[in-house]
Amino acid sequence: MPPLLAQSLPRDPLWRAIFRCLAENLMPIAPQALREALVPLGTNADRLEAIAERVLHTDLGGEDALLQPIIASALEVYWTSMAQSLAITAITPLDVGSVCPCCGFLPVAAVLKSVADFANLRYLHCPLCNCEWHFVRAKCVSCGSEEHVSYRFLEDEAGCRRDDVRAEACDACKGYLKVINLEKSGGDPVADDLATLTLDLLMDQEGYGRIGPNLLYIPGNA
Ligand SMILES: [Zn+2]
Ligand SMILES: [Zn+2]
């Protein structure tokens, strides 16, 4: 089992202090609707914990969609801090290679990077604890199919195919995951994913669904 399993690990109230700090800093710049939603949350621990439960079970959207990215941000800080303090020996490969071996979350994206003498190795990036784990290339992360995988690309202003981000689509399970070349992109998988929402629209039109969530963009929020 992942040592920091998102769905069942008891949470220290510290994460709510992280949330309040984020909320206070957002107040001067947040849209009015978000300010009005944030104010009562600061003193309502039960509601905060209830929304956190939904986020950690990837039960996203609905009436809390406006608040979920902010709460997810606080949980991300909390989980990333815990992951950093773990000994590397506490994390072991799982039988299911598609989920984070540290917290059990689905990946936000895959990244390609060079490690030691090996170029373009593929790792999956966790949106909750920011761990990365190795996963072979040209294989569907969701169902394991190798025969039904194909790629979709964005074009730049000159009509040239972009080589920093592409989507790996699987016709066996109709899932897709972006593959981000860290040496050619901005270098932050979560931000690079958000910066290429056009590719998500394209994949949605073609009938594919995301394999893992970006917790900072939850459809349905304002
Ligand atoms: Zn994780
Ligand atoms: Zn698949």
Image (spheres, rainbow, N blue to C red):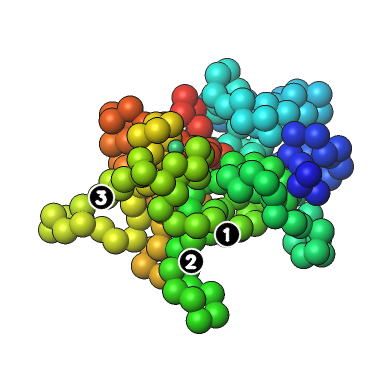
Residue 134 marker: 1
Residue drawn at (86%, 37%), measured in percent from left and top? Answer: 10
Residue 124 % position (x, y): 54, 54
Q: Is mark 2 within 8 Å of ligand 1?
A: no
Give yes or no for contact between labels 1 and 2 (Cβ–Cβ under 8 Å).
yes
Q: Tell me the kind of residue under disc 2.
A: Leu
Sequence order check: which comes first, mark 3 or mark 2?
2
Q: Quadrant of residue 44?
A: top right
Residue drawn at (43%, 68%), measured in percent from left and top? Answer: 120
Q: Taking 2 as reference, is 134 left or right?
A: left
Q: Is mark 1 within 8 Å of ligand 1?
A: no
Separation of residues labelled 3 and 1 (CA atoms): 25 Å
Separation of residues labelled 3 and 2 (CA atoms): 22 Å
Residue drawn at (51%, 39%), measured in percent from left and top? Answer: 142
- Examine the rendered structure and indicate whether residue 162 appears above or below residue 178: below
Residue 121 marker: 2
Residue reaching furthest to the bottom = 117
- Examine the rendered structure and indicate whether residue 69 appears above or below residue 47: below
Residue drawn at (50%, 32%), measured in percent from left and top? Answer: 218
Sequence order check: which comes first, mark 1 or mark 2?
2
Residue 106 % position (x, y): 59, 41
| Residue 193 seen in the figure | no
Q: Tell me the kind of residue under disc 1.
A: His
Nearer to the camera, 24 or 165: 165
* Label 1 element class: strand
Separation of residues labelled 1 and 2 (CA atoms): 8 Å
Residue reaching furthest to the front = 147
Residue 101 marker: none
Q: Nearer the viewer, mark 3 or mark 1?
A: 1
Give the image quadrant in which the ligand numbered 2 is located: top left
What residue does disc 3 label? 154
Sequence order check: which comes first, mark 3 or mark 1?
1
